[in-house]
Image: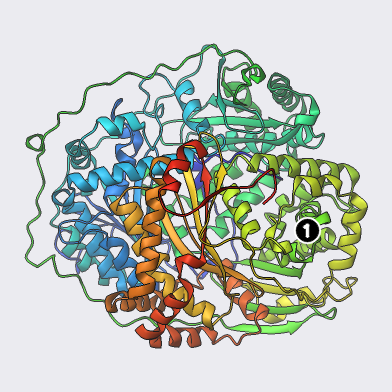
Amino acid sequence: MQTFFQNNGKSRFTAHKTFLPAALSVAIALLLSACSSTDHQQQSGLPAGIQLVETHNPALGTPAIPYKKYKLANGLTVLVHEDNSDPLVHVDVTYHVGSAREEAGKSGFAHFFEHMMFQGSEHVADEQHFQIITAAGGELNGTTDTDRTNYYQTVPVNQLEKVLWLEADRMGFLLDAVTEKKFEVQRETVKNERGQRIDNQPYGRLSERVAEALYPAGHPYSWPVIGYMDDLNRANVNDVKAFFLRWYGPNNATLTIGGAVKAEQILPLVQKYFGSIPEGTAVTPAPKQLFSLTEDRYVSFEDNVHLPLLYLAFPTVYARHQDEAALDILAEILGGSNSSLLYKNLLKNQLAVQAQAGHSCMELACEFTLLALPHPASGKNLADIEQIIRQSLLEFESRGVTDDDLAKVKAQIEAQSVFGLQSVQGKVTQLAHNETFFAKPDLVSADIQRYQSVTRADVLRVYQQYLKNKHAVVMSVVPKGAAQLRAKADNFVFKRPEFTEKSTTSAADLTERKATDNFDRSQMPKAGSNPAVTLPQTWQTQLGNGIQVLGAQTTETPTTALLLKIPLGLYFETPEQLGISSLLAAMLNESTQNYSTEAMSLALEKLGSSISFSAGDQYMTVFVSSLSKNLQPTLKLLEEKLLRPAFAADDFSRLQQQSLQGLQHAEKSAAYLARKHLRRLLFADHIRAYPSEGSIKSLSKLTPAQLKAYYQQLVKPKGSMLIVASDLPKETVEQQLSSLFQGWQGEARVLNTQIPPAKAKHGVIYLVDKADAPQAEIRIAKRSLPMDISGEFFRANLMNFVLGGNFNSRINLNLREDKGYTYGAFTGFSGDKFAGSFVASAAVRTDVAGAAIEQFLAEINKYRTQGIQNDELEFMRQAIHQSDALQYETPQAKLGFMSQILEYQLSPDFVKIRNQIVQNISQQEINALAAKHLDPSSMLILVVGDAKTLMPQLQQTGWPVVAYPQQGKP
């Protein structure tokens, strides 16, 4: 289903809900300890200042995540989960503070401090946190939501002490490093983030506006997590320092460490780095604030959108309230899938192009939401859509809850629970989340039980208690100048409190906490030897119809993931049938000869399985995810979907119209316009110049007969690839696959294409007008190398790493960290077997677009002419070489790794060959590659934004500026 609106607002507790089945296979049980107890053990052997709170070693086969819980004298909670399946460790520090802890008029501080925590501390230089972790071969980030902020790193296990040193330094030694200059730069970065993620996105302000209307005045959820820019503009650096001192003490934090570690061995390091940090101000739980509305609040706003949108939000409970599980199930029944009521009443009959329901929970409150975007050909306005949604609620009331309703949700819960155990990060995230909010790190069994115990009567009761005859916020988002499309005239106006005075908080108002140590914190710990990384052991076979199979056994969870790649995609199309591959993939997600769309969706949901088709440039891919115990029936459904599609006329009409509306919706996105027009400029005489989703002209002319003929010609087994990652042994997988696709025969078409050189002018700025856009999308690009595994393409990306290939690259530090022009700026080589490109990209403030281009060009040219420095070369080598431990952890990661082996006919040890290249590539070779590939005069520039604002700036760069496209044509 085409998705037009994606809720990218506040992070929700629902994102952290994870569940486990009532009974798991032995494969899961092997993750767990054989000891069954939650005991308070003796404290002997622990470092002074650390208390063991509990050891959680569930009985064999119990659905749970084992851990040990400790408490430091300063209040820091420490959780350790031991998992030796991969030589890595994931470290999470969660502070129980989010936007809900802010004051009216001082919004955005929690999110702002997420940025400041990466700007260096007393013993860590500016921008070094990212560099140190990247050089260690790790990954890192931070997130903020309404109720908590977390910082996390995944690194090879030999780098753990370094991570603890970094996290402790910013917990206990941050404020002296927070300067006025850093404050100003990050304030600009946050503004860019808001512009990119909210203001320059269709429907981007929806969550913010709904919250303003839904929550009572002064409620901590009534302002956005990212904050109001006016509030940040009034703040000074001492305001955010005061916020840090209030909320970022160790007593308001949970440190969770998971991976190939032993608790007893790492606790001395925890005590060393965190033990001396003074306790912060006492923190008490925030009160739950349940409320209801006295009338329906109709609100609206105009946006740069193609389709109007209706959004209903009902206040309900709070996270882990006794009614939360039943409300979640109610949301699934109403609008969670293709077997839901909203699908039947709005999507199936083409009254809407998107419709869904959800129940999102936070610490203090939950929201039950329903949304729909009417199909423009349906003749239905937002008022009509509201009535259909309300009639769907009444239909549910009369229809009741079926056995299938409960069975499918409970099966999905079981599957999601097991999938949540596939990575150390997933398990650590659960432990940290549950400890922070509920002081119970492992709630897996409890969650399973509360969902399994929901009855039909429970679901009907919560419907009557929270939705029936209850009032909601009814939000209408309409295209600019189309206020008449609102569901109803606004009857509620949110009045944001006005704060005009600048802050007067001074350094004298701050009382800092200082740690006293008996060691030198300025000395960064040295890492031990790189851990031995075991490449996935693979096996190969071929099915009777010619499908090449590559498999690997992964025993951490009782799951199976399959990736089927069929040669079919944009490269096989003609301009007249552009988009036919993507439309075919969408059709294969629909009804079959023996199942309606709804029945197929229900059958998969009751297994806890998923099957999804998609199409790209070269392949149609089919991704299958299943509990291994349900693999056989899942494969039968895969065979049904792949070999017996119905090509039903109503399915085709609905999907065709959704695709057409999706294209018109995409035209409102500056990032989409940049991608679309850049392809035309770089590949104008080849099918690759077009977007894989097609064009309005081509999609409008496609017919079901053409789609069926295309399917019959190209969907063939011989030449296709099937990659499998499963806990099942090779023999079992082969046996189950042997009976699959027996009636499917034929040979896939061999792709052989020649892509001519680009014809667009170099040294020219092409300007695409997007009136009143708050940001400008910049692309500096040229045609370049086709993709290879260990040749010049691979080496060119090694060369690019320090220019624009990581957070600490020259370009990102310049444009984001030094000048605050953008939320992120990057460069890179990308491509396939036939062609490639080099692209530098960023979304920048409109008022600095010209200056940003000049900085881009200056950095590229400087690197081309002066080359890489010795320390940069070593940084690249360390970062790429040491990242191997993170590459093969999950089944999905293994599928990606093995897919390369099949597609490029590699031996599994190609990784060793690439590591040798990384280790041995010289400064001279890097510089020669930069000189060869980074000449700015060989590049073109594409800018998408407000032309009237941009034109004067772009002309000052000295590059000719061309309005593009001209009269609808490039």
The image shows residue 424 at horizontal and vertical percentages of: 44, 64
The image shows residue 642 at horizontal and vertical percentages of: 82, 62
The image shows residue 719 at horizontal and vertical percentages of: 78, 77
In the displayed structure, 812 sits above or below 788; it is above
In the picture, measured across the screen, residue 245 lies left or right of residue 759, that is left
In the picture, measured across the screen, residue 929 lies left or right of residue 830, that is left
Colour mode of the rendering:
rainbow
Three-letter residue code for mark 1: Ser
Q: Quadrant of residue 574?
A: bottom right
In the displayed structure, 99 sits above or below 922; it is above
The image shows residue 593 at horizontal and vertical percentages of: 91, 53
Of 798 and 546, which appears nearest the observer? 798
The residue drawn where x is 59% and y is 58% is 23
Of 69 and 524, which appears nearest the observer? 524
In the picture, measured across the screen, residue 484 lies left or right of residue 515, that is right
Does residue 58 appear in the picture of this structure? no
Quadrant where the N terminus sits is top right
Of 688 and 319, which appears nearest the observer? 688
Helix, strand or loop under label 1: helix
Q: Which residue is mark 1?
A: 581
The residue drawn where x is 44% and y is 41% is 952
